Each structure stands twice: as structure tokens, then as C-alpha cells.
Image (tube, coloured by chain):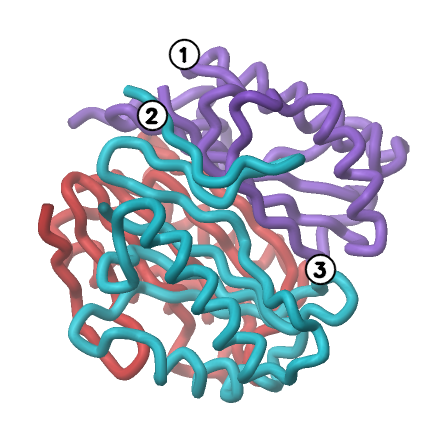
Chain colours: A purple, B cyan, C red
Amino acid sequence: MEIDRIRPGEWNCRACIHGGLVFLSGTVADDKTLPMKEQTAQVLAKIDAVLNEAGTDKTRILSATVYLADIGRKEEMNEAWMAWVDADNLPTRTAVGVALTPGTLVEITVSAAR
Amino acid sequence: MEIDRIRPGEWNCRACIHGGLVFLSGTVADDKTLPMKEQTAQVLAKIDAVLNEAGTDKTRILSATVYLADIGRKEEMNEAWMAWVDADNLPTRTAVGVALTPGTLVEITVSAAR
Amino acid sequence: MEIDRIRPGEWNCRACIHGGLVFLSGTVADDKTLPMKEQTAQVLAKIDAVLNEAGTDKTRILSATVYLADIGRKEEMNEAWMAWVDADNLPTRTAVGVALTPGTLVEITVSAAR
């Protein structure tokens, strides 16, 4: 079965599509000056765009891993998440604190069904 | 193909079922006063329950990611893991140290086949 | 549907094969004295070997999660990655900084299509 790739770049692509499944790369905000909630909103908007290119959307996310530069600010991330997520089609989620590159406060990786 | 969800809550569900695959949210212990080994045992018991609700069990886990609040206590986690895992049906596993919310010593995310 | 396992050990196996998907355990370098770039190259060579045993190869990786003991050395990891990855078949990737066991500078977990 073929693998279709969305926006291949230098070292990765934004999404791999295989059968009924879509795997996304870790997604970060472009504007590193934004605080946690706003970076999260920007990340989620970018994820929406890639999911759409892959022929699916946020109502069909199967799993999300949220990597936070500061676990103490998880609630700020969650405010943006709650404003975005489809309450009738909630995905699974894991949120942990890790070290990210300078300025990046949150990185999110999702897999979805098509 | 439909996505079935186990126990949807406020911001996520405990599991998404899609075709032959089941994805679980990160699972943590309810009793944060327990030490590492006992929190791990509680997490694994909760995972058993969700897998059962999803029509599968620990013998069909495909991948597990173990997030530890203190990588130096990996062996204590592993003692609970060894007492629990089916030796004839071992899953893949990754274990790393991250920052978790206060009191949580271990969080485990698994995917399984049905 | 059956799950085939590659090299089951004490607490995990190197890969689970289920239908068209292959899930690998987190893979680390055997020689902990090596610097980041060389440990990464060793990890990627080990991943190649497991993928081959599972009937696939690096051109069919769907997702990779790269765990770094020092996120500040991400570029050194990436040099080894760039020398290894198939530019015409780029996977998705997420790279984050975590705590690993002593001496381990990088651990990589991948899933692939067969």
C-alpha cells in the first residue's frame, strides 16, 4: 500500500498517509514570542490545515501527544485546546513536560483517521 | 470507517477505536501518595480496564510509551511492568524521563490491536 | 488478526507487526561512549536491521519520535539523520528533550508500513 506525503521538506514531511491512517510531524508555533495559550492555538490551527490537506479533520483525531516546555503551564495549553477540540469527537491525549528548542513552548503530534 | 470512543470526558476520551486499532490516552495513578512501583501497578490496572472496554487486552498491545517523573527510578517501574506483562506476548516499549503534574510519578500511553 | 513479534526479550520485543503496520521499541546505541552524532547513526543502523527483519525499510517509516538527552545538541542528531534518511521518502518526525538512562544521548521510536 502506497504512502502519500504532505509537504516533504528537508528532514521530514508534515504528514504521512497510509491506508485509513494519517500521521503528523510534531507541530510548533511560528511566532515564538507568543505565550503558551496563543502558541497552542497557533499549533492547533496549523494541525487543522495539515489534516485538511490529508483529507481529514480534527473530529477524526485518534491520538494527540502534547509536549510542554513547562508542565506548570498545562492549564494555559488546555484553555486553547478546549476552545478548539470538538466536544462530540474527543481524541485520546497525553501531555508531558519536555525540553523544546528555544522559544517553543508547546509541540503537538497527532495521528488521525481519514 | 467509524471511530468509537471509550469514556469521553472534558478534553479527551480514554480510548479511540478505529478498525482493528485502539489508541489510549496517557494513564496515571489515582493515588498520588503511592511510590513508583505501586503507581505503575495502578496505571497498568487502569489500562487493563480500558483495553477490556475496547474489546481487547494486554496480550495485544502493540506499543507502550512510559513517561517517568524520575528516570532514575526506571527499575521500580519495571518491577511492576514485569509482574504485569504477558511474557508470551510482549509489546514494544519506550521509557523516558519527563516532567509530569505534581505527585504523578508515571504516565503510560499504549496502542493495541483488537 | 495475528501480531508477529521480532526478538522478544525480558520486558519488550523489538517490533510488533500487525497487518500493514510495524511498531518498534525505543532504540538506543550500544556504545554509550560515542558522542550524539555517532550514537544517532548507531541507533539508525539498528532501526534499519529491525525494519528489515519486519519485512520493510526506512523508505516506509510513517512516524519517528526522537528523544534527546540534550535538546541543545539536536543539530548533531540531525546531521546523522540527514545522512541516513531517504530524501524521496521522508517520514514524519518529532524531536524533544527528555531524561534518558546514563550515557544514552538519543533514543528513537519509529512506526512503519510494510
Q: Residue at x 75, y 32 (%)?
A: A40
Image quadrant where residue C91 sits = top left
Q: Amino acid at mark 1?
A: Gly
Q: Which residue is mark 2?
A: A17
Q: Which mark is residue A55?
A: 1
In the figure, A20 relative to A36: above or below? above
Say what secondary structure mark 3 lies in.
helix
Tell me how far mark 1 sits from mark 2, CA to CA.
9 Å
Question: What is the quadrant of the N terminus of chain C in the image?
Answer: top left
The answer to whether any part of residue A16 appears in the image is: no
Tell me how far mark 2 sits from mark 3, CA to CA.
31 Å
Q: Are marks 3 and 1 on the same chain?
A: no
Across and down, in percent, residue B7 comes to 50, 40
Q: Residue at x 42, y 82 (%)?
A: C31
| Chain ID, mark 1 | A
| Chain ID, mark 3 | C
